[in-house]
Image: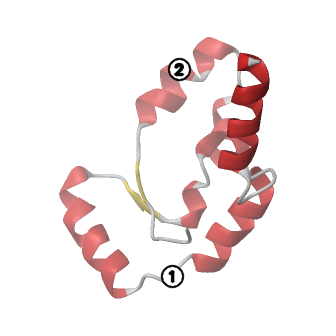
Amino acid sequence: LDKPVIYIECPEFFEKTVLGRNQNKETVKNHKYYNAGRDAGILVEDLSDLSEAVKVSIKNPNEHSAKRRDLSDLILYNPGSGAKVATKTIIELLN
């Protein structure tokens, strides 16, 4: 939908969860497949900055738009057809 996204820094995810799955923390933190495209929005490291991030996003909704589109192209398969394919698959499974 190309809407502004705000990411909240969760160091525990990269410190504990990722390491618990035998992944390299820095690779996961910096790779779009793993980190939900953190560079395609505003990253808030302290919750006290969240309000300002929301204001910035509302004032500049097109900031990071190109990065969001690139991310969509990278991770979405057959965009715009998800509901149709899901419905078809459910009907096939039920039959």
Residue annotated with mark 1: 63
For badge 1, the amino acid type reads Glu
Looking at the picture, tell me which residue is in the foreground, 50 or 75. 75
Up-down relation of residue 69 to residue 36 (above or below): below
The circle on residue 19 is none
Q: Count residues near mark 1 (Cα–Cα under 10 Å), then give few for <14, some for 14-19, many for 20+.
A: some
Q: Count residues near mark 2 (Cα–Cα under 10 Å), then give few for <14, some for 14-19, many for 20+.
A: few
Nearest to viewer (mark 2 / mark 1): 1
Q: CA distance from mark 2 to mark 1?
A: 30 Å
Where's residue 74, x and y in %? 79, 57
- Helix, strand or loop for disc 1: loop
Residue 33 can be seen in this image: yes
Up-down relation of residue 46 to residue 35 (above or below): below
What residue lies at 70% left-to-right and 61% top-to-bottom? 71
Residue annotated with mark 2: 17
What residue lies at 59% left-to-right and 78% top-to-bottom? 65
Which quadrant does the C terminus fall into?
Answer: top right
What residue lies at 74% left-to-right and 53% top-to-bottom? 76
List the single residue furthest toward the front: 95
Where's residue 42, x and y in %? 44, 65
**Quarter of the figure with residue 38:** bottom right
Up-down relation of residue 53 to residue 31 (above or below): below
For badge 2, the amino acid type reads Thr
**Quarter of the figure with residue 85:** top right
Which quadrant does the N terminus fall into?
Answer: bottom right
Where's residue 79, x and y in %? 74, 58
